[in-house]
Amino acid sequence: MSFSLDNLKDPKLWLRAGYTLLSLIVIGYLWYWIFYLLLLIWVVQTGFWLYGGQSNEDGLAYTKFLAQAFYQYVEYITYITDKKPYPLSYLP
């Protein structure tokens, strides 16, 4: 890895930095709503578990989908992958 001021001229670097900032803004804005969505999912799944003895399969599939979408953001923001998250590419 070379450290050079020439790297600052690379348009791919600036595009990636802009997409990462956009992802952080989206997550920051939605964080409040994500908490309440997770709380709602927890209440519903706990209700199914208490009354039926098992979780709702449709709810599990939806929760898994949300977790994968969120994980895409975390991987992109922390530079683990170059694959862009949802509004910038396809959902998982």
Image (spheres, rainbow, N blue to C red):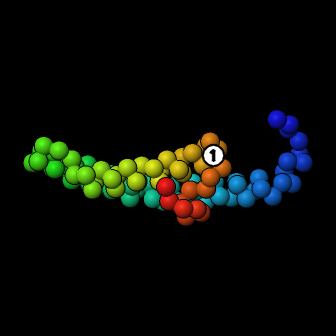
Q: Position of residue 58 (x, y in %)?
A: 27, 56
Q: Is residue 32 left or right of residue 80?
A: left
What residue occupies the far left of the structure in this picture? 51
Q: Is residue 25 left or right of residue 37?
A: right
Q: Position of residue 50 (x, y in %)?
A: 12, 45
Residue at the location (45% across, 59% down)? Answer: 30
Q: Position of residue 2 (x, y in %)?
A: 86, 37
Q: Is residue 24 left or right of residue 58?
A: right
SS state under label 1: loop
In which quadrant of the rendered view does residue 11 lie?
bottom right
Residue at the spot of label 1:
81
Image quarter in which the N terminus is found? top right
Query: How busy is the neighbourhood of tag 1: few (under 14 within 10 Å), some, or many (20 plus)?
Result: few
Q: Position of residue 8 (x, y in %)?
A: 84, 51
Residue at the location (38% across, 58% down)? Answer: 33
Q: Give the residue type that dot 1 points to.
A: Thr
Q: In this orientation, does residue 90 appear?
A: yes
Camera-side residue: 53 or 17?
Answer: 53
What residue occupies the far top of the structure in this picture? 1
Camera-side residue: 67 or 32?
Answer: 67
Q: Is residue 83 left or right of residue 44?
A: right
